[in-house]
Structure formats: structure tokens, C-alpha cells
Image (cartoon, helix red, strand yellow):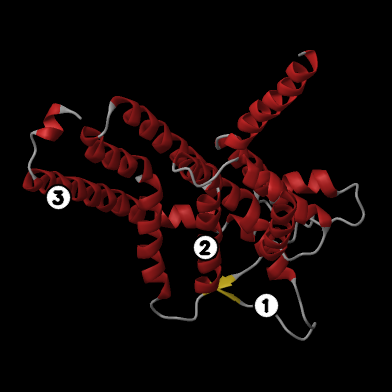
Amino acid sequence: MEENSEGMTFWDHLEELRWTLIRSVIALFVFAILGFVIMPYIYDTWIMGPTRAGFVLYKYLCYATSAVPFMPDFCDDTFYVRIINYNLTSQFFRHMTTSFWLALILTFPYLIFEFWRFISPALYAGEKRSIRWVCLFGTIMFFIGCAVGYFLVFPMTFRFLSTYQLSEMIENTISLDSYMDMFLMLIFIMGLVFELPLVSWLLSRLGLLDRSFFKKFRRHAIVGLLVLSAVITPSGDPFTLSVVFIPLYFLFELSRFMVKPEPEETDGEDDSEQADDSPRLSVEE
């Protein structure tokens, strides 16, 4: 253990934890204020982007699907969904809550750093290297997951649901609260889903998971991921389903790569070699 950790009393650790929380709250508060100031621009440019035909994903999907007849039409330049507000206080509270969520995302690396700085004195050198790598990898995967949720999963889900009609007599009127609830939910869910390789690595370090699990349940995982992809993007066409399924299956295989190989493999090989050697010796004798 580090000397400064050994010399600290319980109250010293409590004081250090207090200052860690204070610095984290201050960082969140500062970024929330900045987010509150620029939030109208963020709404117009980014958050409401999937409601217009000029969204970046729709342009690329237009090029990719225009030659295939059974694919959904992403080339409709008239696509536009009007978001309305029917609650007097919704816009004000959405302004505040979205500023907080934006601040939480932007300060996520700093919060991880504060967590690392608090626990690092109690770790050995080897443990520090492992935790440092875990924090960096977890942060990167979280941001990648949020990006996949924003640029891929949410726009495709929103486009299908906003254009789906049970009857021509029913007109879709999408409220601000409904739009933002799905927007935040899908983005943060994808951010958490992309932590699956990290969770698998931690379970492997604890001895609770090895690669035999992924071999044994690969077929079950494929079916489960297909169902999950169909729930996330309920359009029913194979293109939309595969666009969501492929990243999820990639995470499954990446998780397999992150865990330790099953110990039974090497032990079994040694036992078989011994079993093969013993009859040879008896025959030669």
C-alpha cells in the first residue's frame, strides 16, 4: 500500500471523499450553467436534428438504400416532424433537465478522474495500472455507445414510429416530453450497453466468467440480440434490423475477447497427454 494511504485515518479519508464530491458537484454545476446558456442552439442543431430530412444519417441511408426496392425510403426531402408542447412548464423544465444531462455527459471523464484519484492511494502498483485502463476504456466505450444511440438507433426508431399510422384518420402529434423521453432513454441505454465488454472483463477478473460461457450461449445470445434489435427498431425490414444487430453482436464478441480463456482447456489437454503417454509406456514395457 502507499505510505500516504497508510498514514491516513478514517476521518482523513472521509474528508478526502467530501472534497471529491464537492469538486464533482462544482464541475457539474458549471457545465450545467454553460449548457443552459447554449441549450437553444443545441436543441435547434442537434436534439431536433432527427426530425428533419437533412439529418446526416438520412442522407447516407438514402444513398445506401435507393437502389434496393424493399428498403425504407430515406430519400424523402419533405420529411419533417413537428414537435409540440401542451404543458405550460415543460419547455422550462426540459431546458433545465437537458442542461443537467449534457453536463453529466461532458463531465463524465472528469468524474471518472475524481473517482480514480480518490481510490488510487489504496491500490498497489499493478492494481493502479488495471484501474487506469478500466477507467479509460469504460469512458471511451460509453461515448461510443452514446454516439451510436444518437446517430443510428434513435433516428431510425423515431423515423419509423413518427411515420407509422394505424389509420389515415389518425394524425401523429408528438409532444416535447414524449420526444425527449425516448431521446434520452435510447442514447443512455446504448451508452450503458457499450459497457458490456468492461462488465465482462470485471466478472472475468473475479473468476465468475470465462470464454466457455460465450461458446455455450452464442446461439441464445444471437436470438436475444435479434429480439432486442427488433424491439429497438420495430420497423420489420431486414436492413434496419441488421444495422442495430451488428453493433450489438460485435459487443458480444468483443466481450468474449476481453475475458480469460476457460481453465478446463489447458487442464484437459494435459490430462489427455498423460493418458496417451501411459499406454505407450506400458506397451513398450
Quarter of the picture containing the N terminus is top left
Question: Does the rendering let one see residue 45?
Answer: no
Q: Is residue 257 left or right of residue 185?
A: right
Nearest to viewer (mark 2 / mark 3): 3
Q: Position of residue 181 (x, y in %)?
A: 51, 68
**Label 3 to label 1: alpha-carbon separation:** 49 Å
Q: Is residue 51 left or right of residue 207?
A: right
Q: Amino acid at mark 3?
A: Arg
Q: Who is closer to the viewer here, 116 or 96?
A: 116
Q: Residue at x 22, y 36 (%)?
A: 122
Q: Which numbered disc covers residue 18?
A: 3
Q: Residue at x 14, y 50 (%)?
A: 18
- Mark 2 or mark 1: whose residue is earlier in sequence: 1
Nearest to viewer (mark 3 / mark 1): 3
Q: Is residue 110 left or right of residue 208?
A: left
Q: Who is closer to the viewer here, 81 or 259?
A: 259
Q: Residue at x 7, y 48 (%)?
A: 11
> Crowding at label 1, few (<14), some or many (≥20) Cα neighbours within 10 Å?
some
Q: Position of residue 6 (x, y in %)?
A: 12, 34
Nearest to viewer (mark 2 / mark 1): 2
2 and 1 marks in contact (CB < 8 Å): no
2 and 3 marks in contact (CB < 8 Å): no
Q: Residue furthest top?
A: 284
- Mark 3 or mark 1: whose residue is earlier in sequence: 3
Q: Amino acid at mark 2?
A: Met
In this picture, is 29 found above or below 232? above
| Dot 1: element | loop
Q: Which numbered disc covers residue 172?
A: 1
Q: Which residue corresponds to mark 2?
A: 185
In this picture, is 6 found above or below 85? above
Q: Position of residue 180 (x, y in %)?
A: 51, 66
Q: Residue at x 54, y 45 (%)?
A: 209
